[in-house]
Image: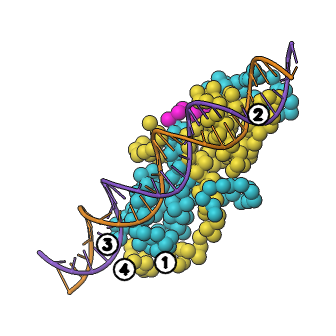
Chain colours: A yellow, B cyan, C orange, D purple
Amino acid sequence: MNSQTSVSSDEALRLTPDEVSSRMPDERTLYELADLFRVFGDSTRIKILCALSVSDLCVADIASLLSMTQSAISHQLRVLKQVRLVRVARKGRSSVYSLDDDHVRTIFDQGFRHVRHIAPSSERGEAK
Amino acid sequence: MNSQTSVSSDEALRLTPDEVSSRMPDERTLYELADLFRVFGDSTRIKILCALSVSDLCVADIASLLSMTQSAISHQLRVLKQVRLVRVARKGRSSVYSLDDDHVRTIFDQGFRHVRHIAPSSERGEAK
DNA sequence: ATGATATATGAATAGTTGCTCATATATTCA
DNA sequence: TGAATATATGAGCAACTATTCATATATCAT
């Protein structure tokens, strides 16, 4: 049997699935949230966002900064633009990209705080 | 030519790639950041985290809540555990999962703020 | 217009990932 | 111990994604 409502020990209050369900945001919002975070979940895009948090940059500069091809960077910038994390401004033949708003920085900082807080152990994935 | 240092208009200061490079966190940290956000970048995991932010829950309850198989949930909980976003406590034959710390909630909230702020348009991906 | 430079984009591909299915492990109860 | 319940996990597969390559578009200088 599951879903016991009784507080069997010194743990936090446990609610039933139904009670939890009624207190969750609507599905739509949760999917949008996942979509947003997925964009942050790639090292190339993270590097781009991080670079842009330091300074506005054109495509070629970002490519040189990350030692990646112009094409790869352009593709990722498109993704970042679609979710409104960056915006473009044409300057002559260059496209100067910048962070769209400060939410990016805030989300970033929270992430930093977590990885620093956790520091050691696990974190399998891209991290070498 | 790129990397112009002159401020050609009313835009933010633009730095050279080298200047930007020296002000970025080390690679290792950026990879860890991407790894962390990637975990948030899946709707199933987002739902699980969201549910756990409301109440501690056992595997079966989460599965019923999300209408998914126990196996699928267990696999995702493993991922969440590896990056220290959730922790387990055995209670009889059940495993009761809970958020590991409050960074999760904070990162969440920032994400919420962004998707609400942006609200309309784009956001292609999982969002129906 | 022509050539050079900067960026954008479509198609193809290799690598990754989330789920399912089968099965193993763990715990409780009779 | 043996049956039942709850969870964990490995293998396999389908779907997705980040990069490359080729090429298109856009802007500037001559």
Q: Are the residues under badges 1 and 3 in a single subunit? A: no
Stretch of the chain drawn in magenta: B24-28
B18 over C17 or under it: above or below: above
Residue A40 locus on image (x, y percent): 59, 47
- Disc marking residue A1: 4
Residue A18 locus on image (x, y percent): 53, 78
The answer to which of marks 2 and 4 sits earlier in the sequence is 4
The answer to which of marks 4 and 1 sits earlier in the sequence is 4
Residue in view at x 42 percent, y 69 percent: B69
Which amino acid lies under the numbered mark 1 shown in the image of this protein? Thr
At mark 2, the secondary structure is strand
* Marks 3 and 4, how far apart at CA: 11 Å
Give the left or right position of residue B65, taking residue A72 as reference: left
Q: Nearer the viewer, residue A20 or A127?
A: A127
Are the residues tagged 1 and 2 within 8 Å (C-beta)?
no
Q: Nearer the viewer, residue A29 or A10?
A: A29
The residue tagged 1 is A16
The residue tagged 2 is A95
- Disc marking residue B92: 3
Mark 1 neighbour class, 10 Å CA radius: few under 14, some 14 to 19, many 20 or more: some
Give the left or right position of residue B40, taking residue B88 as reference: right
